[in-house]
C-alpha cells in the first residue's frame, strides 16, 4: 500500500531556527515529538514550508538525519529534494537517502519553466538516482509550470514514482489521474482537504498540521469511516485555521508563529526573504486558534 510508503496524515514541517537564523536543534526535536504525539505518520522535511530555498545542502542532509533519528521508524520521513537543477536534485536525493529518508518529495522544476517532456526527463532522472519512493509535487502557483495529466500518467509508469502532492487544486484532473494510474494523491492545499479526501485521496500534506495534526487525523478517520457529517463538522472547525495560516501571508511564517505561540518551538524566526508575522497577522492567527485551544485534544507535545 502507498500509505505504508508515505503515511496518510503528513505534515509539511517547518524548520525551527534561532533568532540569528541558525538551525535550532532543540526546536527541531521538540517539534518532531509534538508531531508524533499528535498522530502524524509522515513528516516532510525540507519542503516549501521548511524554507527549502534557503537551506544549504549540508543543512538539508542534517535535517533529514536529525528527524529520522528522532522518529525511529514511528513515522515516514519524506525529504524535499526538488530544485530547478536536475544535477542538484540528484545529489540531494542521494544525500537524503544516506541520511535516513524513507522517501523523496520532488517538486516540478521552477523558474526555468521546462516543457512537459523536460519535466518527465527531470523526474525520471531523479527517480533513477536512488532506491527511494518518490512523491511528485505539483504546485504551479510557485513553480510557474503545472504537471499535465498526461505527464503524471507517463511518470506513473516508473516503479518508484508512487504519489503526487497536489497543490494545483484541479480536483477533476486529480480524480482522472487517480482513475487511470496507481498514483496516490495527497492534498497539498489545506483549504481543500475534505473534498480531496472525499474524492479518494490517500491523505494530506498539511501546513496547518504543524500545530493541529491531531484534528487532521480525526478528519481522515471520519472520511474513511464514511461519517461525512462528522467530517464536515471537523472541517468547519479547521477552516478558520486554514484561512489564518495559509491566506494571511505565507504558510511557513504563520505555522511558525502558531507553533511558537503553543510553546512547541522557541522562536518564530524565518530567513529572508521571509519576514516574521507583524502584530496584525498574529492577532488574526490567535483569534483563529482560540477556539481550538479550548479543546485539549488539539494540542499535544
Image (spheres, grey):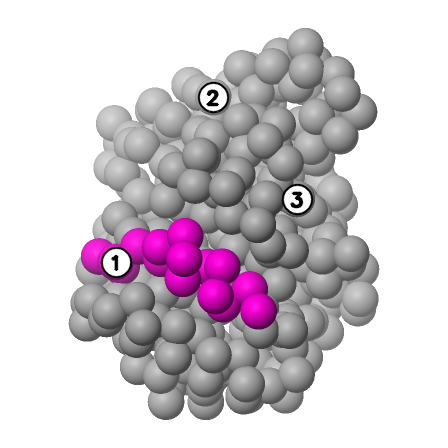
State the residue position of label 1: 145
**Is 285 one of the magenta-colored residues?**
no
Q: CA distance from mark 3 to mark 1?
A: 24 Å
Residue at x 54% of width, y 33% of height: 196
Q: Position of residue 220 (x, y in %)?
A: 69, 32
| N-term-proximal mark, 1 vs 2 | 1
Q: Is residue 150 magenta?
A: yes
Compute the Cα span from label 1 to label 2: 28 Å
- Residue at the spot of label 2: 239
Is residue 49 among what the camera can see? Answer: yes
Residue appearing at x 24%, y 69% in the figure: 115
Distance between mark 2 and mark 3 Cα atoms: 20 Å
Left or right, residue 273 beside residue 252:
left
Q: Which residue is mark 3?
A: 202
Q: Nearer the viewer, residue 196 or 232?
A: 196
Residue extent of the magenta highlight = 143-157
Amino acid at each position: 500500500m502507498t500509505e505504508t510508503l508515505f503515511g496518510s496524515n503528513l505534515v509539511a514541517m517547518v524548520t525551527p531556527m534561532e533568532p540569528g537564523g541558525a538551525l535550532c536543534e532543540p526546536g527541531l526535536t521538540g517539534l518532531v515529538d509534538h508531531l508524533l504525539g499528535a498522530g502524524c505518520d509522515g513528516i516532510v522535511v525540507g519542503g516549501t514550508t521548511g524554507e527549502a530555498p534557503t537551506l544549504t545542502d549540508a543543512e538539508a542532509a542534517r535535517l533529514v538525519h536529525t528527524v529520522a533519528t528522532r522518529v525511529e521508524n514511528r513515522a515516514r520521513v519524506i525529504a524535499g529534494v526538488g530544485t530547478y537543477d536536475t544535477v542538484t536534485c540528484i545529489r540531494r536525493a542521494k544525500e537524503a537517502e544516506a541520511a535516513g529518508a524513507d522517501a523523496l518529495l520532488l517538486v516540478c522544476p521552477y523558474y526555468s519553466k521546462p516543457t512537459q517532456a523536460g519535466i518527465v526527463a527531470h523526474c525520471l532522472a531523479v527517480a533513477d538516482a536512488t532506491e527511494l519512493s518518490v512523491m511528485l509535487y505539483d504546485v504551479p502557483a510557485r513553480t510557474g509550470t503545472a504537471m499535465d495529466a498526461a505527464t503524471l500518467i507517463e511518470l506513473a509508469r516508473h516503479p518508484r514514482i508512487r504519489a503526487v502532492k497536489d497543490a494545483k487544486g484541479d480536483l477533476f484532473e486529480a480524480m482522472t489521474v487517480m482513475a487511470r494510474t496507481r498514483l496516490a494523491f495527497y492534498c497539498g492545499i489545506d483549504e481543500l482537504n475534505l473534498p480531496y479526501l472525499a474524492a479518494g485521496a490517500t491523505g494530506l500534506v498539511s501546513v496547518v498540521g504543524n500545530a493541529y495534526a491531531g484534528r487532521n487525523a480525526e478528519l481522515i478517520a471520519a472520511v474513511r469511516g464514511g461519517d461525512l457529517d462528522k467530517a464536515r463538522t471537523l472541517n468547519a472547525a479547521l477552516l478558520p485555521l486554514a484561512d489564518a495560516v495559509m491566506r494571511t501571508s505565507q504558510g511557513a511564517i504563520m505555522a511558525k508563529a502558531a507553533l511558537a505561540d503553543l510553546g512547541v518551538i522557541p522562536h518564530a524566526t524565518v530567513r529572508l526573504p521571509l519576514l516574521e508575522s507583524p502584530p496584525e497577522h498574529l492577532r488574526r492567527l490567535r483569534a483563529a486558534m482560540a477556539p481550538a485551544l479550548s479543546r485539549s485534544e488539539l494540542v499535544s507535545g
